[in-house]
Image (cartoon, grey):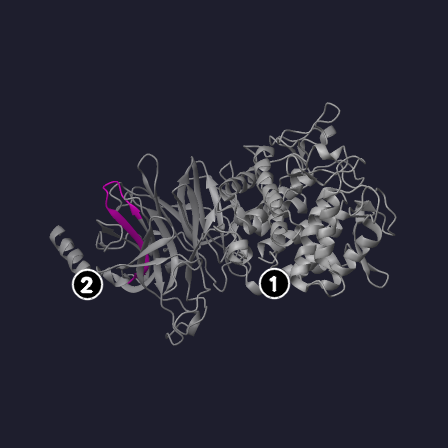
Amino acid sequence: MKKIASLIITVACLAGCGPKNTFVYEGNPLVRDKYTADPAPMVASDGRLYLFCGHDECFEDRPGYEGKYGFNITEWLCYSTEDMNTWTDHGVVMKPTDFAWSIGEAWASQAIEGPDGRFYFYVSTQCGDPNCKAVGVAVSDKPEGPYVDAIGEPLIVDSMTDNGPRGWWNDFDPTVMIDDDGTPWMSWGNGTCFLVKLKKNMIELDGDIIVLPMENYVEGPWLYKRDGHYYNVYASMGHPLETISYAMADNIEGPWTFMGELTGMAKDSFTIHPGIIDYKGKSYLFYHNSILSLDGYGPATGRRSVCVDELFYNPDGTIRPVIQTRAGIKHLLPAEDGAFKTRKYRNVFVEAGYAPEAVDAKVNEVFNVVFFGPDKVYFEVEDSLAYISDIKNQDVRTEGMSYGMMIAVQMDRKDIFDRLFRWCKKYMQHADGPYEGYFAWSCKVDGTRNAQGPASDGELYYVTSLLFASNRWGDDTGIDYKAEAQYILDCAFAKDGSTGVNNFINTEHKLITFTPDNFGYTFTDPSYHIPVFYEIWAEWADDGRADFWNGCASASREYLHKAIHPETGLNPDMSNYDGSLRMFRGSHFGTGNFRYDSWRVPMNIAMDYSWSCADKEWQREYGEKVQNFFYSQGSNDFVDQYRVDGTLPSEDEILPAGGWTKALRHSVGLVSTVAAATLLTDHSINKEFVDALWDSQNVPYEDGYFDAYYDGLLRLFAFMHLSGKYQIIFPES
């Protein structure tokens, strides 16, 4: 018998073993040259991940299957990888007709390495006598096969499962695991989930078949053990198509606890089939949908395609819901060179699987919400003016006005830009006196000043947006944008502190001040630091200070290294120029914690990286650090204020917003900026933040608090960044 089996394997190898094709993973679906279904991953002792799946061959004219809606697995295929990127196609490992007792129809399969070092392939096919679905087992010395029938007859037939309601449809979709004590277990079933112990030879039953009462169970179980927990992940009935659900247990024979749905329905496919594996420190969910078009055939239920997305566990062992994506495990890779050099920008949303047209529509939607929606913050007044209002505080701020100008020039809305700047010139900018050239940081909506002094971040954005406007529209269309930018800078350098007003850049440290008065000149705000803005000034301000501005960019990047916590990635609202916490009245409450101003830092660093890439190693580390922190707090639960060490603030440290009661919230503004940090990272959790931003809505919180202004503007900025629409504007050629 051994000689015959050896001969069969030799003949099969001569017929099917040849040069293996390799391909690079390009996102979902994984395999793009044929239709594939029912994925079953296995990590072998050789360190490679092997993926087994059925080959769907469904054609319009298949008799008896109502055309395109039929299923027709004609053979089982094998692929392998050692990096989840480059895959080897091993071709056909077995056909259902290789079993003498099979009449050729096939369903799901799974391979596993046995205690003897050989590989056992459990399949479901049609048994000829009696005519029923059956489970067979084949064996090979190599994971990629070829495989031969191990016992010459089915392992499971219908007569063995007369307690299942589906009759001759009871027995398919086998899954096998080996427990910590070396005991093999097999589960399978359609309509009923069956379980049986196997002997250690992997080809005989060792006890009675039992029923596992799995809630909402349909088919396709995947049985495994991880960190002491047993899991059964399976296809469940959704509305109206299959979804993936799972159950957990402390004992393989139960009781099992239903944990809910893991995924939604598969696109264009009635069925879905899970396969879960840990590989090289990450966890993956393989499944199928029907999104592939091939050889003139479009998506259909019987033309399925294997996909893979990363899977994440909570600390208690439960599994986070998995969003099916087009990008799959193709990581969102950070740039190697900045846009100053490449003039290229990533569309992270598209990389994450969103359609380009949907991304464009989403960005326009968010823009219109902020500027023209029912809860808009943009208001046109008089014949040619407009302002952006912090609604909750009932004022107009240089922060919002300069943000609005930046958004307008990015969106090529000269009408909005000019209206905003004219309002700033009329009501906010000082025409003379100690503050000449600077802008009063807060005004009433009628233009009356609430304060005379400036906030330095306003000037930062004014200058940059004006230079971009000059590059985009020229300086002869009503406003000389470059001259206005130069005026601000020249006025700043004319101030030496003798009148109580200084340069908004601390010229000794080459760092932006908190405010350019004698008080704020001595410290800074980390969220004011966007080093690449100075490189833009060096390039296009033409004010004779290019070397100084480039020095400011370098100093700002060095400062951020010091101001940001080395473990959490959090920063304070304010700090000294050496990065230490700025103390007031013997307390850091109100200045030393990560709060509203601080939210902007992840997005600012992402901008600096995307545009300049001058500090990419540190910035990438920062991006992963800060996203990991918020992920550890729960990607849907993290709050908007922390101490920089990551602990929660005490009640007296919480800063209320807009007169509202002190509260910690999962704020949309922070959700947005943490998502923007995805430009820096290549770890898989970044997709969670991208999806969270995509699904975000700026609406009132449970306590009634609503911030159309700050949350709204940061959300819009984040959408612009991740869609590649926030760009360096070069002069028109």
Horizontal placement of 247 versus 383: left or right? left
Where is residue 72? Give x, y as percent: 36, 66
Specify few, some or many for label 2: CA neighbours under 10 Å numbering under 14, 14-19, or 20 or more: few
Residue name at image x 45 percent, y 64 percent: 290
Q: Earlier in the sequence, mark 1 or mark 2?
A: 2
Residue 93 vs 625, above or below: the answer is below
Q: CA distance from mark 1 to mark 2?
A: 51 Å
Helix, strand or loop at mark 2: helix
Kind of residue sitting beneath label 2: Ala
| Magenta stretch contains residue 583 | no
**How far across and how far down the image is residue 10, in percent?**
15, 57
Label number found at residue 488:
none
Q: Going by the image, does 418 lie left or right of 7?
A: right
Is disc 1 surrounded by few (<14), some (14 to 19) or many (20+) residues within 10 Å?
some
Compare residues 408 and 63 and report the one nearer the observer. Answer: 408
Place residue 525 in its image quadrant.
Answer: top right
Which residue, given by chain and number where applicable, does mark 1 sit on?
A: 360
Residue 141 in percent (x, y) is at 21, 49
Residue wearing tag 2:
15
In the image, residue 307 above or below residue 639: below
Q: Residue at x 40, y 40 (%)?
A: 225
Looking at numbered disc 1 in the image, what kind of residue is underneath it? Asp
Q: Secondary structure at mark 1?
A: helix
Q: Which stretch is magenta?
A: 112-129
Can residue 698 be spotted in the picture?
no
Instruction: Find residue 595 and report its horizontal and vertical position in percent.
Output: 68, 37
> Is residue 692 visible from the viewing direction of this image?
yes
Quick one: which residue is furthest to the front in this view? Answer: 544
